[in-house]
Structure formats: C-alpha cells, structure tokens
Image (cartoon, grey):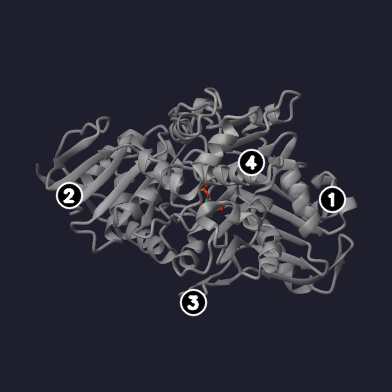
Amino acid sequence: MAVLQIATQPFADQRPGTSGLRKKVKVFQQPHYLENFVQSIFSAIPDRAGQTLILGGDGRFYNREAIQTILRMAAANGWGKVIVGRGGLFSTPAVSTVIRARSAHGGIILSASHNAGGPDHDFGIKYNTANGGPAPEKITDTIWAASKTIQGYQTLDSADVDIDQDGEFLLGDMRVEICDPVAEYVELMARIFDFDALRQLLQGPFRMRFDALHAITGPYAHEIFEKRLGAPAGTVVNGVPLTDFGGGHPDPNLVYARPLADHLFAEDASDFGAASDGDGDRNMILGRQFFVTPSDSLAVLAAHATAIPAYRQGLKGVARSMPTSQAADVVAEALGIAHYETPTGWKFFGNLLDAGKITFCGEESFGTGSDHIREKDGLWAVLAWLSVIAHTGQSVAEIVTRHWQRFGRHYYTRHDYEALPAETGEQIMQSITAQLPVLPGQTLAGRDIIMADDFTYTDPIDSSVSTHQGLRLLFADGARLIFRLSGTGTEGATLRIYHEYLEQDAQRQQQDPQRALSDLIRLGRDLTRMESLTGRKTPTVIT
Ligand code: G16
C-alpha cells in the first residue's frame, strides 16, 4: 500500500471551538475538508510515531466515512496502532476511559455533541490528549495554525477496512484493533460504584427511565441498567443509536428531551428520569415532578460524595465553570475543601484534575464528572444520583429541597438566543463591554452592582491566561448576570444569558425560577437591547 501525498489548500474556517471543530455535514463533505483538519491535528502531535490513538464517534451521519479516512491518514502519518470502537462507535467518556486504560497518546472523537445529526445537520471532530481530556488551548491553537498554512496531507492508497468485527489486523504498517466500545467503560463504572446497592434499588419498587435520545449512550445504558443492575426491560428508551438521532436534537434539556420530561411530570411518573446527549458526556436529572439544575446537581453530588465507594475518603476540591451557579462553592466551603472557577469548557478542568486539586467538577451546560476520566460523563452522573438515592432512601425532590434548606437555594436560569446573525451577537457583546466600566456603583434590578468585567482566567497550575471568557455583573447580594457567546453553535451566533441569585429563606425557596429571577431577566434583556436589535421577544431555549 503506497503512501500518497495529496496537494491541498487551506480552508479559512477551521478554528476549533469550545470542543473541537463543528460544522454542517455538507461543509465536512467538501473535498479535502476533513483531511485538512485531520492532517492539522497530526501535525500538532510531532511525537506520534509508533504511538496508539483511540478512535470512535457517536454514530451520527458521516461517522463511518470519517473513520475510514482517518484510519488511512493515521497509517500514512506513522501512528503505531489505532483502537476503534466496533462500528466506529465510542462515547466521549469511553474514549477518555480507553485512552487512560491503554496508555494511548490521544484520541479522536467524531461528534457534534448535542447538535442534531443527518445530512443537513452537524458533524464534528475533536482531539483528546494522553490524560484523556480535551486538547488544551495551546494544542488547539497549534492545530488551527497548521490548518491555515496546510499545503498537503498524507494518506494511504487502500480500500475501506471492516470496522464491524472485533479483532486486529494491519493497515500498511499500522495495527488496527476493533474492540467492544462498551466493556472497558462499564468495568470502570463497576469499580467506582456499589453495583450491589444499585441492583437492590433497581430491582425493588423504584422505577427509573433513561432516555438515550437515539444517541451513543443506548448500548452503554442497556448494558449497565438493564443487564448489570437488573432494571426491568424498557427502562432504557430510544436506546438504538441512529445516524440522525431519529430526527431529534440529542440534547438532554427540558426542550429537546420533552417526552422524558412529560413522563416525569405525568400522573404515573417514574421515580427518576435521566437523559444524555449525542456523545454521552452530558446528563439531565429529573425526579418525579422535579427538575434538577446542573448547577444544583454538582452541589448535591459534592455534598453526598462519600455515599459512593470511590469517593468514601472525601473530595479534594470541586470546580465549576464561571457561568455555573455558586451552589457548589457553598458546599465546598462547608466541607472545608478548595473550590475553583474556570472558563466554560471541560478542558479547563484538566490541569486541576491532573494535579489532584479537585475530585468533582461540573458545568451549567449539563456536564458533571470526576477525576475518574478527563471528560464530563453522563452515565457516571446518573449512577452517582442513583447512589445518593439508594444511600439516603430519599426521593430526588427530598434530596434537593433538604439541600436548599441547608445551603440556600441558588435560583438559576439560562436564556439562549440561538442563530442570531453573527454580527448582531458581536454587536451585543461589544455594547455591553463598553458599559462595563460605568456599571459598578449603579443600582439595577433593585440590586447594587459591585463589579462588572470580562472574565479572565489564570490557570493555577501552568499560569496560562485565557481572556474574553464572558461578561459578568456581580451584585452586592451575591446575584450574578452573565453574558456569553456560545462556542459550539454552527449557525450564526448563540447568545447565552445566565441569571442567578441565592435565597436563604426556606419559606421562599419554592418559587418558579423564571418568576424569582424576573428582575434579572428583564435587566439582561434591556442591556442586550434584544428586542430592538433582533425583534426577538423570547429566548429560543430556557433552561
Ligand atoms: C462543550 C464543552 C463543555 C462546555 C460547552 C459549552 O460541550 O465540552 O465543556 O460547557 O461546550 O457550550 P457553549 O459554548 O455552547 O456554551 P459539548 O457537550 O457540546 O461538548
């Protein structure tokens, strides 16, 4: 098999975003587009010769074609071995698990996460490093720089290989292993959690529903909940991964996982409901007639961590992304452990986890995880919640309301304005940025503003500095209003507005968050001049 050197030219738009490169499938299908980006990744890893790479994706449209392209290019670029999940499938947490378990040099994950899939929707590709986590900015910047000057890529003159049978074979000089994408991940979960206790819970009267949204977690959830833990067949719904996710958005929130939410709010609701996203790293947790915000979820799990065998010794510290509510900070202070505030993006937790500074971390964007891998982990979060339920014998609603009584309730809501014209998004951010210097000292929404800035993060481990990570207004009573442009959308700009305040009074902790936060919501809309600039009266998604 000959190595081919194919001439090419740079594409202007291959800058990796919050997690890799995400574009419409049609963009990826342009000649040389995927190849250019893959070559740019490989060029950013000069010590790849002879090393092992893990490869898989969430099964969305174009996954299988991309796997073949990447295998040929990996062989031509000197990799020693590529381990591929059978059928080209791997969840993001499973890739992180296998990178670490096999001491691989890195991994490539094919996914556009929670974005819709199919020929008219999204595809994506991201690179994870040897610690199992998303490539840090210094590597993604190198990839981007390489993509701007690329003149050619190397590939192998070879036919497609069979990725549907477990086994090993040679592709050129490179070994390829096709493996079960589920097994190593499930073994890790069995080491972290008390499967006997969970089996007792799930084989009793307790009822749960897990909605895999026709995305990657179906096979993992079937194996864990129904086979290993003995939950009744039918506990996992929409468990077969489909290339277009059955036409839905594989996004576990109240809008896109509506049927699950409807079930949990119905008369005959299960006791517990959960969903995960396209690539299996996000989670949504529901109780009977109860929605747990991701920020509360992190705080509750931190408060109950010792209920889980792997964390019985307690936590080293916790971290949350800046727009995530401060609920976890309050728990950390009560536990006497450190807490950190990072920019949005799981990659920012990597150094803290590697340095042993934190055990749990989470984000408002439905991401929760621990130091067991270097990605957020949807099924881990579900198992963690089941562990807390089994340990306390309480319902989800009881666990959370007792948490609020003890620590206070951080009312929280995020409003998303999706697919704005890109210039409008920039214009809104610039106009708020211009007002930042004059906001402190003003009283708005009935509260005194004590600080207003554009969040800058200095990594406590390597001192790298990340600027422009979101505009924040901090109020004297601890409330916050935050504005940020999404780094994961593929259509125009998505503006996110995050609203939060702490209610200590237990008598006032049962309000509807939209109502409790209405003055901050109004202020956010006013400062963006949303209606006059865009004509939009309401957000696209409220969580
Ligand atoms: C990705 C990152 C998350 C981050 C999210 C933010 O999530 O992995 O760590 O919180 O993006 O998204 P946005 O920039 O749109 O607010 P995922 O699940 O899409 O990979």
Q: Earlier in the sequence, mark 1 or mark 3?
A: 3
- Label 4 packing within 10 angstroms: few (<14), some (14-19), many (20+): many
Residue at screen point 14% across, 40% down: 157
- Name the quarter where the N terminus is drawn: top left
Up the image or down, 511 lies above or below 360; here it is above
Measured in 3D between alpha carbons, the distance from the residue under mark 1 to the one under mark 4, in whole angstroms, is 19 Å
Residue that label 1 marks: 509
Q: Nearer the viewer, residue 438 or 446?
A: 446
Quadrant of the rendered image containing residue 56: top left
Mark toward the start of the polypeptide (4 vs 3): 4
Inspect the image, locate mark 3, and give the three-letter code of the amino acid beneath it.
Answer: Ser
Q: CA distance from mark 2 to mark 3?
A: 36 Å
Secondary structure under tag 3 reads loop
Q: Badge 3 is on which residue?
A: 463
Q: What mark, if any, has residue 253 been given in the picture?
A: none
Q: CA distance from mark 1 to mark 3?
A: 39 Å
Task: Measuring from the top left, give residue 13's x and y in whole percent.
Answer: 42, 52
